[in-house]
Image: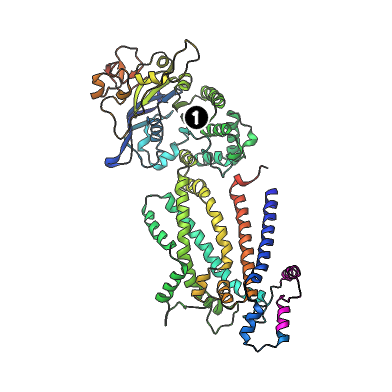
Amino acid sequence: MSSPVLEIRNLCVDYGVGATAVRAVRDVDLTLHRGQVLGLAGESGSGKSTLAYGLTRLLPPPGVVTGGQVIYHPPAGAPVDVLAMTPAQLRRFRWAETAVVFQGAMNSLNPVHRISTQLLDVLKAHRPTSTAVGRRERAREVLRLVGIPTDRLDAYPHQLSGGMRQRVMIAMALLLEPQLVIMDEPTTALDVVMQRQILGELAQLRQRLEFAVLFITHDLSLLVEFSDHIAIMYGGRVVEQAASDRLYQQALHPYTEGLLQSFPALRGPRRTLTGIPGSPPDLRAMPTGCAFHPRCPYALDVCRSRLPPLGRPADSHAGRTVACWLHPTAEPATGTRP
Amino acid sequence: MRFLLQRLAFYLFTVWAAITINFFLPRLIPGDPVRSLIARYQGQLSTDAIDSLYVLFGLDQERSLWGQYVDYWAQLLRGDLGLSFTFFPTPVSDVIGNALPWTVALVGITTLVSFALGTGLGVLAGWRRGSWLDGLLPVTTFLSSIPYFWLGLVAIALLTGPGSFFPSSGGYEPGLVPAFDTIFLGSALQHSLLPAATILVSSMSGWVLSMRNMMVTVAAEDYITVAHAKGLGERRVALHYAARNALLPNISGFALSLGFIVGGTLLVEIVFSYPGLGFQLFQAVGAKDYPLLQGIFLIITVSVLVANLLADLAYLALDPRTRKEG
């Protein structure tokens, strides 16, 4: 694949400071390539949304990014560290380079302003030299992209259905043609039919406009279909990363395996859905060694005492990494390029 | 439009109900104004005079209750609220007309200023949560729990007295004739400063608190995060996204307080002997001046209703969700 658009290096995010701080994201390394869809999956509390908010610096207090780098590679020019930007730089960077589609389709729009106002103020803030007519034309254009009749431009959010609102949010994300769109459970609040429809449209748009997507969801079945690469998070760490088809065919980490067995396959022989016993770890009192070992059916002695490093497993192909003692690392990971 | 007509019908019904209650209330109270007037004149009234007083107050026994009710309405529609008997024979409408401007000017202006200042401070304190502005909160809670009249008494005790700039009572210098000239207006302003400050201090804190809390609630909404993610300026997010939504619940509170302007802050006016409607009401109660009481109640009721109508209109303008599709 081509050049990276976003590199996350050793990102750590804490909630709170001092002795009571809880580390929600631990030493995460991820690389997102231009035009690629990277899926991020995990249970609630695994740190996937915190990661997304952390890397866009949208983390509400008491969340604090305590370490690492988020390096953005603009199409032209030198790479920049998002975490080191000044407030003014950050404002210019936001939405123009990285747009976000949030979880709550229902609450992402300001209820007291028209759709048009909320689309236009992005353009006004980022393209101060544009004309009013030009801005409106651009707003109409993006609405057409997501299949919303342009006469809805002056509607209020409450006059639109949930699906339409999320479409408006996607249209809004595409306004400035960003290189990267972060989607945090964009379809979770919608019914399955609408989910499918919007995801289909999203896939088409992505191919046409060639933006990269960081797709966050707890629904692994969705990711297998929609993304090129998948990273699985558990207890704030990435525990496995691979191309989506390979991950689906052969999950290495027992946690990934558990996630995959939590939804039925459409084809192939019937199998029982097992799910994963136990519950996600308490971030305040993480188990020693591998965080998954209390729930892991294959746990070894070493799992209880030593944290498995994330790296390319000796017994598998290149291009995937896993952090599990069942699959000892062939070489220590240096970044985790897929 | 249909919504507006519905509201209007509702308000008309309420006005009717208020007026009807207003009509029956004095008739339910034991004793009647004529008897209290007789007591005032200590038996110096002749029977003829007493009879004519009964007719004058519309209390003549010959008329049925229904007849009196119809007469009352006819009177009201003529703008005739009857005669006050503290200021006998001045019409009630004149007494109210003299007191109303004082109250509206003093309480009206302070209510507006207090709402504007309090909301502004609340927006700031809510947006900059965790800054030094949070130190204001215990102070505002403390101030908002102080009753007006006590603050007024403290202000009088501490700030007025011989040689002080602040007069302790009245609406203007006793020797002056009310007129629109600089001397009179200056004097009126000087007299209003202390009561105004009293009202401001204790009423503003309520606005600060409620606005600050709404700001904090709204700041956690998804659309605020989206607005930040969009790279909008801090001011635009704070005002157009956060404050604009946080303001809505405060609007109805504000409208209610507008309604109570006319009722005056009774206790402040009493404490400062301010010649407003609240002070008048107090005197009317003391003198069992039923026509005046009735008149003042009517004015207060109507103004509360008008303020509510205004709140409905403001809501309609500010929150698109309350508008019917169209």
Q: Chain of mark 1?
A: A
Tell me the residue at 55%/58% (across/down).
B254
What percent of the width, then of the height, locates residue B138? 38, 58
* Location of mark 1 (residue): A188
Residue at the extreme top of the image, as rendered:
A269
The answer to whether residue A78 is visible is: no
| Above or below for B196 versus B237 | below
Specify the quadrant that holds the C terminus of chain B.
top right
Q: Could you tell me what secondary structure mostly forms the magenta stretch?
A: helix
Residue at the extreme bottom of the image, as rendered:
B44
Pick the front one: B253 or B89: B89
Three-letter amino acid code at the position of disc 1: Thr
* Magenta residues, start to end: B50-79
What percent of the width, then of the height, locates residue B107? 54, 67
Tell me the residue at 44%/73% (across/down).
B153
Which image quadrant is residue B159 in?
A: bottom left
A17 inside magenta stretch = no
